[in-house]
Image (tube, rainbow, N blue to C red):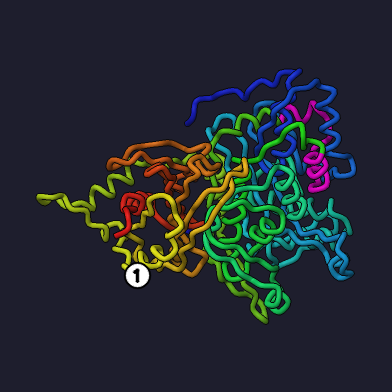
Amino acid sequence: MFRRHAMPEEPPPRLARGMWKRFLVAIPLIVVLTAAATATAGLEKLTTFAQEALPKSSHITTARGLVLPAYDGEPQTFLLIGSDKRAASRDQFDRLDPPHSDSMLLVHLDPNQGQTSVLSLPRDLLVSIYDPQTGQTSYPEKLNAAYTIGSYDHGSSDPAATLAAYTIEKLTGIKLNGIIDVTFGGFIDVVDQLGCVYVNVDHFYDNPPALSNIDGYSEIYLQPGYQKLCYNNALSYVRYRHDDSDFVRVARQQDFIRAVREQANINLGNIDSVLKSVGDAMRTTFSPSASELEILAKLLLFSQQKPLRQVPFEFSNDDYQLGNPPVDYVTASQQDIQSTVQDFLYGNQKVSLHQATNAIAAATSSGRHHEFSPAAIGLFPTPSSGQASLVNQGSSIPFRVLYPRLQTGPAQQVDTRAYTIKDRSGVRHQAYVVVFQENTDGGYYDVEAMNWNDPPLITNPSRTASIDGRHYIFVDDGSHIHVIAWHEHGALYWVNNTLLEDLTNAQMIGIANSVQPLG
């Protein structure tokens, strides 16, 4: 996520020597940030698992001082690189073409904070790349070029990840405690082994094979709505960039990570395949020893049930052109970067329901009936044509169909869909989704419902609260409401914010309050 211009100290949990159950979580957590394990074994077995998941052949060796270990219980910051290495491709050009870093995320785990902070760095950020191995400086360059330059100059993935990390550390001043270089294909394979993932697909994604051969983008066909994504669909979803910005793409990837974090599961039946997938998916600076990973596990376990906060990257211009022919860059001032880093390391913003409800109260007149004035918070009546389209779709819905009476001013309803979804036990449920397009920059928000009453979506809510007679379930992202849900008529209903969270908290609550029966 991008934008323009103190908790009490608590030690991380102790990890019993004979209980690798929770430590086991740390291995795939390095890739997917969280999971849930269900067995116990001894320390010897734990060491074996560490060696399987982090083989010596996957170790990243960096220049001295670039990655520094932290003391047990201290905050730690890791660099996650999503790269597109294609060494096994059947296409010779793909095999020989230098790899690229599709995404670069900083993850900050701090026992003193009630959250895990994630910061996505814009791949198109204008930077100067200095390579200490060659003594050469490249300018102008995009940030993601550091990975490619490292690979091109030295011919292996170690210098690629090292140069990317060196450039990011020089840019932000943040000291790194570890690097994880993950291929997207390998990451999704791990997700598959963990049982796939349920995701709120915000709108219709369609790029058929015939068009894919012409425009060069990957094939994708995903209908909107909450659904389970496995390998091919998940990979196409996180890499999608056909008609939206890099900012939206990064927000989609962060949202996907949030979903995986809540749902990943390990059991004795699939542990071997999970560990193999983890080992194949990534290269890291972590050695395959139980003692080193135990320290990391304590931090990760402490963060497991804490909110995942997406920290916005502040920038000055997202369409700066330089060169001949001109190339588009994202630019950020030193003040932008310092403000972003300060927020990432020390920020602890939370949703203020008091402020949101005060904004709604201020939009209510002091007249006899205290009528609510939606326009005061940017909401307006939805057209009757939207209800008509849902009536046509909703004939198969076995529960009460509700529809929002209010929408944001710029929004247009672009889709309605009734569908079925299987829960984690394979039981089929009915669902529907109404899609509103807020803006042309990937801004879609949704009103959804299903008679599956306890999906992973609301497994770990940020809070619950009663507002105007409804008991709401909130999933927050820092200071923004990401999802607001409630149970009614034997079903679960919710409003899902855009990927960039364009809707204010007052608008999210206002729309949820306006969701009423058709007619």
Name above or below for residue 454 compared with residue 45: below
Give the image location of residue 441, x and y in percent.
51, 67
Name above or below for residue 35 compared with residue 14: below
Say which residue appears at 84% left-offset and 54% top-offset.
157
* Nearest to the observer: residue 169 or residue 77: 77
Q: Secondary structure at mark 1?
A: helix
Give the image location of residue 430, x and y in percent.
50, 51
- Disc 1 crowd rating (10 Å Cα; few below 14, some 14-19, many 20+) is few
Say left or right for 42 vs 486.
right
Give the image location of residue 242, x and y in percent.
62, 70
- Which stretch is magenta? 273-296
Residue under label 1: 385
Give the overall secondary structure of the magenta segment: helix
Say which residue appears at 76% left-offset and 31% top-offset.
268
Number of labels in the image equals 1
Q: Is residue 446 visible?
A: yes
Quarter that holds the N terminus: bottom right
Q: Amino acid at mark 1?
A: Ser
Say which residue appears at 66% left-offset and 40% top-offset.
264
Give the image location of residue 158, x and y in percent.
84, 51
Please identify the residue farthest to the left as the structure is shown: 368
Name above or below for residue 240 compared with residue 481: below
Say left or right for 417 vs 320.
left
- Does the magenta segment cover residue 249? no
Quarter that holds the C terminus: bottom left
